[in-house]
């Protein structure tokens, strides 16, 4: 009957138990194994490591699986290593930072001034980028104090993107002073730009005249951010965008969404960060937070008057022809891409008339404060 050797924690203890079971001495075991008895004595007292080869020999001698010896040897070595090793909080901190942050991408983008992740400057660069007192105080770490209040659970990548937007916005000068009257007037000016994608070139100037700092920062690969609204102070709103979907309909929806946040002073106490602003998240259902429902409704109505859109859908659904969409767009004096984008949101048919979803990034970026697509916004160190 196979004995239970669970109480034997080390390979030496197991050998002693097996010797006692057989009534053998260490000399007998040395003779059977064909080795010097001093080696057996060292194995019994766990002063000689049990190698894979020795575990096989012991297994043959005692009729025990070699893994019984080898496994206990590994546990013994691990326990000894744990006893000798000193805890290193800095190592744990670095592990969290490099696991959560896209450090290599931040280096490539010029956000961190280092040649690579192994550069000796990388830790001080992370401290500088996040404006922290030390590495342990960088707020993407789970134990660090949170300096940035966000309306959602932000990932480390999203916080990194947000910090970059803040850095750039702090360097930006605007031509006008912010007021609610001014921003509402600015939205009316933007409304006149919806007929053609190239008209988006006027957006940076209009927003600057309204006292709004408008910043475009290419998204980090894992961030999936569309836009953000926050305030540097009570009279300095910031709108940041990623243009991760280079489409006219998405640009105007996200921009108007963020401007509604500005108008209603959302983002003053808690940053209004909008990630994956599509599908249900771009709607007005009960699952969407109230501030976001308000901003979504304003954005949808800005792109296409919703009462007229609903009547159009009721008449044409499910057959939306190219001819009908073009005629509807001429009647409203807006680009057909805005209509198609809103129909797609309403119906969930995202393959519908995609040829009208005009690209817009090349028109809006030249006059904007941008960071990405090969350009690095110069930040004063």
Image (cartoon, grey):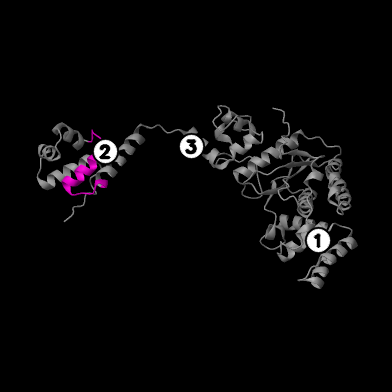
Q: CA distance from mark 1 to mark 3?
A: 51 Å
Q: Is residue 14 visible?
A: no
Number of other residues with Cα within 10 Å of mark 1, as a class: few under 14, some 14 to 19, many 20 or more: many
Which label's residue is closer to the chain start, 1 or 3?
A: 3
Q: CA distance from mark 2 to mark 3?
A: 32 Å
Indicate the position of residue 280 as horizontal and vertical percent values. Answer: 68, 60
Which label's residue is closer to the chain start, 2 or 3?
A: 2
Which label's residue is closer to the chain start, 2 or 1?
A: 2
Q: In the rendered image, which residue does mark 3 sit on?
A: 92
Provide the secondary structure element on which disc 2 rests.
loop
As drawn, which residue projects farthest toward the bottom? Answer: 315
Which region is colored magenta? 46-67
Provide the secondary structure element on which disc 3 rests.
helix
Q: CA distance from mark 2 to mark 1?
A: 73 Å
Q: Quadrant of residue 98?
A: top right
Q: In the rendered image, which residue does mark 2 sit on?
A: 51
Decide: marks 1, 3 in contact (CB < 8 A)? no
Q: In the rendered image, which residue does mark 1 sit on?
A: 339
Indicate the position of residue 347 as horizontal and vertical percent values. Answer: 73, 66
Of badges 1 and 3, nearer the viewer stands: 1
Q: Is residue 59 in the magenta section?
A: yes
Locate the C terminus by quadrant. Answer: top right
Of badges 2 and 3, nearer the viewer stands: 2
Locate the N terminus by quadrant. Answer: bottom left
- Could you tell whether 339 is left or right of 147 in the image? right
- Could you tell whether 80 is left or right of 143 in the image? left
Provide the secondary structure element on which disc 1 rests.
helix
Indicate the position of residue 363 as horizontal and vertical percent values. Answer: 82, 45
């Amino acid at each position: 009957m196979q004995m239970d050797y669970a109480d034997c924690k080390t390979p030496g203890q197991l050998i002693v138990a097996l010797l006692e079971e057989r009534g053998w001495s260490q000399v007998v075991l040395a003779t059977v194994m064909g080795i010097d008895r001093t080696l057996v004595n060292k194995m019994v007292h766990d002063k000689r490591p049990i190698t894979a080869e020795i575990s096989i020999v012991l297994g043959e001698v005692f009729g025990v699986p070699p893994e019984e010896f080898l496994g206990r040897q590994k546990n013994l070595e691990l326990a000894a290593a744990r006893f000798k090793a000193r805890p290193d909080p800095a190592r744990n901190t670095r592990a969290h930072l490099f696991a959560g942050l896209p450090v290599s991408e931040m280096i490539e983008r010029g956000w961190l001034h280092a040649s690579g992740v192994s550069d000796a400057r990388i830790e001080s660069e992370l401290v500088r980028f996040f404006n922290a007192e030390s590495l342990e105080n960088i707020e993407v770490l789970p134990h660090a104090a949170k300096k940035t209040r966000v309306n959602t659970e932000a990932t480390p990548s999203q916080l990194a993107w947000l910090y970059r937007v803040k850095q750039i916005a702090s360097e930006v000068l605007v031509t006008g002073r912010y007021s609610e009257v001014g921003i509402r007037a600015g939205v009316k000016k933007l409304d006149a730009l919806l007929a053609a994608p190239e008209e988006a070139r006027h957006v940076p100037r209009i927003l600057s005249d309204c006292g709004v700092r408008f910043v475009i920062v290419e998204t980090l690969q894992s961030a999936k951010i569309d836009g953000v609204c926050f305030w540097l102070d009570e009279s300095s709103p910031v709108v940041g965008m990623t243009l991760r979907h280079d489409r006219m309909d998405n640009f105007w929806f996200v921009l108007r969404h963020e401007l509604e946040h500005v108008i209603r002073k959302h983002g003053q106490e808690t940053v209004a960060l909008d990630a994956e602003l599509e599908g249900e998240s771009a709607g007005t259902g009960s699952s969407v937070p109230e501030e976001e429902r308000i901003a979504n409704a304003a954005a949808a109505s800005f792109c296409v008057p919703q009462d007229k859109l609903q009547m159009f859908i009721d008449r044409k659904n499910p057959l939306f022809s190219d001819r009908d969409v073009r005629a509807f767009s001429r009647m409203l004096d807006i680009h057909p891409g805005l209509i198609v984008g809103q129909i797609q949101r309403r119906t969930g048919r995202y393959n519908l008339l995609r040829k009208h979803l005009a690209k817009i990034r090349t028109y809006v970026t030249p006059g904007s404060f941008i960071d990405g697509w090969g350009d690095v916004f110069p930040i004063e160190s």
